[in-house]
Amino acid sequence: MDLGLRGRVAFVTGSSKGLGRALALALGREGARVALTYYQDEAAGKETARQIEEAGGQALPAFLDLSDETSLVEAVQLVRATFGAIEVLINNAVAWPGFPPPGERFETAPIERLHTSLRANLEGHYRLSQLIVGGMREVAWGRIVHISTGLVLDGLPGSSAYVMAKAGLHGLTRTMSRELAREGILTNLVMAGFMADERRQLPESVLQQARAAAATGRTTRPEEVASLVMYLCSAANTNVTGELIRADGHFLTPA
C-alpha cells in the first residue's frame, strides 16, 4: 500500500531510541523528510538520522526540551527553515518518572513530580501542536498522533502524576479532532504496549510480569506500534480521527 508520505515533512519527538526511533525510521522508509528530536542523548539522535539517510531518506536531528518554550519554538523554526511546513506530527517523547521509593503513599508523593510530569508529558505536546497546526491549516492537510499508555485506562499504583498527564492527551486528541478535521487535519492517539527499554536494564521478574499481563504472552515490539501509527499518519487514512487506540497486545496492567 502506498501511504502517500513521500516528500511529506514529519516531526517526531523523542526519536533517539526505542519507539521514537522505530517511528522515525518507518517514516523515512516511506520517503518522508523526517525531523527527529533528542533531549539527553545527542549521539543517539544523530544515529537515528544516520540510519534514515543510509536507507535513502532525509533526516534532521534537533534538540528539544518539551518543558521549555524557547526550545519548542526554535525546533519548529529549524524544521520549517530546512524542510518547509510540517505536515505530520507524532508526539512520542515521554518523561517517565520511574517507580516511587519504598513506603511512598499517594498523599506523600511530592507535588513537584506532578508539575514536572504535566510540563513534559502534556503541556509540551499541547504547545508543540499549537506551533505546528497553523502550517497544516495553510496546506489543508495534516496528521497528528499522540502516543499514550493504557495505564490511563487501567491505572497504576504509585504513578498518579504520570497517568494524570497522559490522560490529558486523551481529551486533547478528541478536542483537536473536533476543531481540525474539517480542514483536513486528522488527530488520533495510540496507547503503546509495554516495551523492553534498551536505555535501562529491567529485572527479569518485571519482564515476566509484563509478558504475563498481555493476552499475547509477550511484550510489544516498537515496530508493531509504528505500523499502526504509519497508517494513521498517512494519506491512506482519510476518515479515522479522534480515536484512542490500544496497541499493547491486550495488556492488563498488574495491580
Image: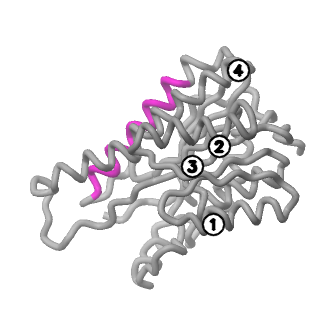
Name the image quarter holding residue 178: top right
- Kindly state the secondary structure of the residue where label 2 is placed: strand
- Separation of marks 4 and 3 at Cα, in angstroms: 22 Å
Q: Position of residue 112 (x, y in %)?
A: 20, 50
- What element does badge 1 sit on? loop
For label 4, the residue is: 184
For the residues labelled 3 and 2, say whether their Cβ atoms are less than 8 Å apart.
yes
Disc 1 from disc 2: Cα separation: 21 Å
Q: Where 248 falls versus 116 (above or below)?
A: below
| Foreground: disc 3 or disc 1 | 3
In front: label 1 or label 2: 2
| Residue bearing the label numbered 1 | 221
Q: Amino acid at mark 1?
A: Arg
Magenta residues (range): 159-176
Query: Which residue lies under the disc numbered 2?
Result: 11
Q: Residue at x 59, y 62 (%)?
A: 16
Q: Position of residue 111 (x, y in %)?
A: 17, 49
What SS does tag 3 mark? loop
Q: Looking at numbered disc 3 in the image, what kind of residue is underneath it?
A: Thr
Give the distance between the C-alpha atoms of the residues marked 2 and 4, in whole angstroms: 18 Å
The residue pinned by badge 3 equals 13
Mark 4–mark 3 CB contact (< 8 Å): no
Which of the marked residues, 3 or 1, is nearer the chain's N terminus?
3
Amino acid beneath label 2: Phe
**Most distant residue in the bottom direction:** 204
Q: CA distance from mark 1 to mark 4?
A: 31 Å
Mark positioned earlier in the residue sequence (1 or 4):
4
